[in-house]
Image (cartoon, grey):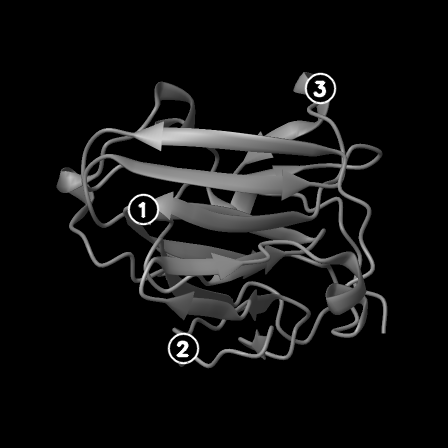
Amino acid sequence: MPHCCRTRVRGVRGWSARISGWGAKVVVPDRFGDSRGWFCETWNRQRLLGLDIDIEFVQDNQSYSRDTGTVRGLHYQSPPFAQDKLVRVIHGRILDVVVDVRRGSPTYGRWASAELSAENGRQLLAPIGFLHGFVTLEPDTEVVYKVSNYYSRECDGGVLWNDPDLAIDWGIPADAAQLSDKDARAPRFVDFASPFVWEE
């Protein structure tokens, strides 16, 4: 039975706060403001290297969710098209969730979450070997994310978002969630054969 947890992250700037010690991180870039507004580098390879994030991103994706309570996930891509994701919100607010599914990991099956919004500027790094998903906390929410590999239909997979064995606290009742047909039919965690292996 997997162990479950909620990991809350303080809004500390300075480019990073580790959410769990598993490799998943919340990155919080510096913002420089004045009377006009603010300026921010949303991605800087040199700064990320300083945080032990050495990832070559190849594609940017963007999603728009009209309604509060829209759930997207839990998703992954299996090798050879496995993806790291760096997720941020440009309008609205989400609860972003990761689940460790690296076989042999001491935290296998554990989940963590962080609130991302256009206002707080946080970004979540969901590394290869983690399921990823989010629920929108406001209407008209737009999420953008960098990925380290291209989409592959053959390698695309998922796990049921509200699987009772994972017991993720999404903050909404199941009957309030808006899902795609694909996500609503995703397999249970007990039936999930993870293609990922933990490496110390």
Nearer-the-camera pick, 91 or 37: 37
Is residue 74 visible in the rendered image? The answer is no
Q: Contact, CB < 8 Å: mark 1 with mark 2? A: no
Mark 1 lies on residue? 135
Q: Secondary structure at mark 2?
A: loop
Mark 3 lies on residue? 154
Marks 2, 3: nearer the viewer = 2
> Which disc number belongs to residue 11?
2
* Among the two numbered marks 1 and 2 on one chain, the one whose residue lies closer to the N terminus: 2
Give the Cα separation between the discs numbered 3 and 1.
25 Å
Q: Residue at x 50, y 39 (%)?
A: 144
| Residue kind at label 2, given as amino acid type | Gly
- Residue 11: image quadrant is bottom left
Q: Secondary structure at mark 1?
A: strand
Nearer-the-camera pick, 178 or 42: 42
- The location of residue 16, given as percent across then percent down, is 60, 75
Q: Residues within 10 Å of mark 3 (few under 14, many from 20)?
A: few
| Residue kind at label 3, given as amino acid type | Glu
| Residue kind at label 1, given as amino acid type | Val
Q: Is residue 113 above or below residue 137?
A: below
Q: Residue at x 23, y 29 (%)?
A: 66
- The location of residue 54, given as percent across then percent down, is 83, 60
